[in-house]
Image (cartoon, rainbow, N blue to C red):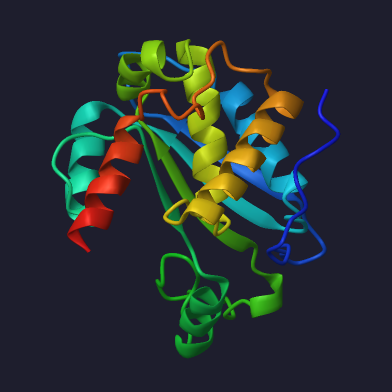
Amino acid sequence: MADGPPRRIRPPRRGPVDGEVEVFVADEQVAHPVDATRWGRLAEQVLLAEGVSGAAELALLFVDEEVMADLNRRFMRVDGPTDVLSFPLDGDLVAAVVDGHEGGRWPDAAGPGPDREPPELGELPLLLGDVVVCPAVAARNAPAHAGSVDDELALLVVHGVLHVLGHDHAEPDERAEMQGRERAHLEAFHGIPALDPWQPDAEASEGEQADARRGEDA
């Protein structure tokens, strides 16, 4: 068992005190059925270990290759499906939208109804964002990356949650920090992967390859 994740250098994310961290999981594909409860729990454990507290929400979605390819093209400008995408919500942006929308309701911005008052910002849960995973791509990458589909999915969930919380791997120091946190979280909450996906000679996942291509295009 690991002593715990490396020291957190980003401030913890906190929602309203009267509440708890929740992860909502949806398996929207059939090619590789997943254990929604298990992966939701892993995401929750990572959030708590990273200092998220209070009423906070994260969505974890498992989708097929067609849906992932569409998301990858629309939001990352990369053709083809990738293994994981993260869509963080900026807390300041959420606050600005809520404060600036008179008579509205977060998150759907519809009217509050004749007998409802707009919620107080302090009562709203902290919306962390969405993590989208494609099990079909994970299964394809696993033999040369984490070693098993189970380990690959665990790595993608942890990787996606860390991205939502603001971690990145564009620079060598950021990559080292993020990989260190991935290792620690997996050892603490899942187990050591069959292969070492962080070895320099390990074949990069499709998501990491896409990150590299985007960096070259920048």
Judge from the rendering whether residue 32 lies leftward or rightward of residue 89; answer left or right.
left
In this rendered view, identify the residue nearer to me: 21 or 209.
Answer: 209
Name the image quarter holding residue 170. Answer: bottom left
Q: Place residue 202 in its image quadrant.
A: top left
Does the rendering let one see residue 185?
yes
Instruction: Name above or below for residue 94 compared with residue 67.
Output: below
Percent x, y for residue 2? 81, 29
Q: Is residue 20 left or right of residue 202?
A: right
Image quadrant holding the C terminus, namely bottom left
Residue 54 vs residue 126: left or right? right
Residue 115 vertical placement versus 181 (above, below)? below
Report the label total: 0
Q: Residue at x 48, y 64 (%)?
A: 89
Rendering quarter of residue 154:
top right
Foreground residue among 38 and 47: 47
Judging depth in this view, the residue of 99 and 104 nearest the camera is: 99
Task: Please provide percent x and percent y for residue 80.
Answer: 16, 36
Q: Report x, y in % for residue 12.
A: 73, 62
Q: In this view, which residue lies farthest toward the front?
A: 201
Residue at the location (68% across, 46% down)? 47
* Residue under the point 69% across and 34% down: 185
In the rendered image, the residue lying farthest to the left is 79
Q: Position of residue 144 (x, y in %)?
A: 38, 15
Residue at x-position 46% and y-position 49%: 130
- Residue 41 seen in the current view: no
Quarter of the N terminus within the rendering = top right
